[in-house]
Amino acid sequence: MSAKLIDGKAIAAELRQSLKQQVTERTAAGKAAPGLAVVLVGDSAASAVYVRNKRKACAEIGIESFAYDLPDSTGQSELIALIDELNGRDDIDGILVQLPLPKHIDDDTVLDRIRADKDVDGFHPENIGKLLQRRPTLRPCTPWGSIDLLKSTGEDLTGMHAVIVGASSIVGRPMALELLLIGVTPTICHSRSGDLERYVREADIVIAAVGIPEFVKGSWIKPGAIIIDVGINRTDDGKLVGDVEFEAASQRAGWITPVPGGVGPMTVAKLMQNAITTADRPNQ
Ligand code: GUN
């Protein structure tokens, strides 16, 4: 078998096009363009690329982005003070703080400080709690975008078993909640799950989100399975690879996302969708 590609780049472009239309309609109706603050702390090259892509998407869609590029030496209290200021500003609807933050700053303390109704990443405990309670409001972008990619296959997903490799707060855990909403049965594997191969072999859907290059072996894949590869890892020779052995997995899977051009563009497009939602203050 040779897997069909799930073209995240094209699906994300289509979503951005419809979001652009929504923003055009908003502004034609006399409303202000949605405003998104994009905060980058430190000098990670990878984060700089992600943030550039997010700002580019804002420009394309008609969302006004406000750039806050802060040095690595920024203190936690300084960052909190900025969040407080942005929380109070009427021209800023959404706030994005790019992760990871420098080691001397506690991610949770900062993310918890962002007003829940400005939380375009969907990471705030209130938004995660609402997703858990089956009333999603602002949804974590990568899991939400991955659902769109699964649906794009046209397969009947109901009743399928999904194995999520990686239990992070920003991907693995919310991914399980998103899958439950569409009638899929999720299993979350983590570093202590033991015999990972045993789980993956059972999976109709594999969501790989561990951040380890080619960690999920192609030989583990159940014939016909759908593979969503969230990983983006740079190898020593500069190549980008996912968390799944792409070539070997493609021989067995029914569908697979490429890296790059799979999940990455969907994360950005879903962030844009959330940014438009924040302009209507969904939690108020
Ligand atoms: N770093 C890696 N992924 C993400 C994401 O989805 N949002 C933010 N803010 N930072 C990230």
Image (cartoon, grey):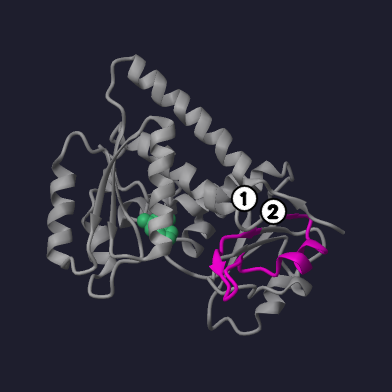
Q: Nearer the viewer, residue 123 or 48?
A: 48
User: Mark 1 sits on what residue?
Assistant: 183
Residue at 55% across, 68% down: 233
Q: Work out how far the residue at label 1 is from the one at label 2, CA to CA, in angstroms.
A: 6 Å
Magenta span includes 247: yes
Q: What secondary structure is found at the residue carrying circle 1?
A: loop
Residue at 43% across, 40% down: 57
Q: What secondary structure is found at the residue carrying circle 2?
A: loop
Q: Is residue 6 left or right of residue 187?
A: right
User: Mark 2 sits on what residue?
Assistant: 159
Q: Earlier in the sequence, mark 1 or mark 2?
A: 2
In the rendered image, which quarter is residue 74 located in?
A: bottom left
1 and 2 marks in contact (CB < 8 Å): yes
Position above or below: 148 against 47: above
Horizontal and vertical percent position of residue 98: 34, 57
Q: Which quarter of the image is occupied by the N terminus?
A: bottom right
Inspect the image, locate mark 1, and give the three-letter code of the amino acid beneath it. Answer: Gly
Image-quarter location of ligand 1 = bottom left
Decide if residue 135 is in sight here.
no
Magenta span includes 57: no
Position above or below: 32 against 176: above
Find the magenta span and give its range: 228-256
Mark 1 Cα shell of 10 Å, populated few (<14), some (14-19), many (≥20): few
In the rendered image, which quarter is residue 179 located in?
A: bottom right
Position above or below: 199 against 4: below
In the rendered picture of this protein, how many numbered marks are placed on residues?
Answer: 2
Q: Nearer the viewer, residue 188 or 150?
A: 150
Inspect the image, locate mark 2, and give the three-letter code of the amino acid beneath it. Answer: Gly
Horizontal and vertical percent position of residue 254: 79, 55
Horizontal and vertical percent position of residue 109: 23, 65
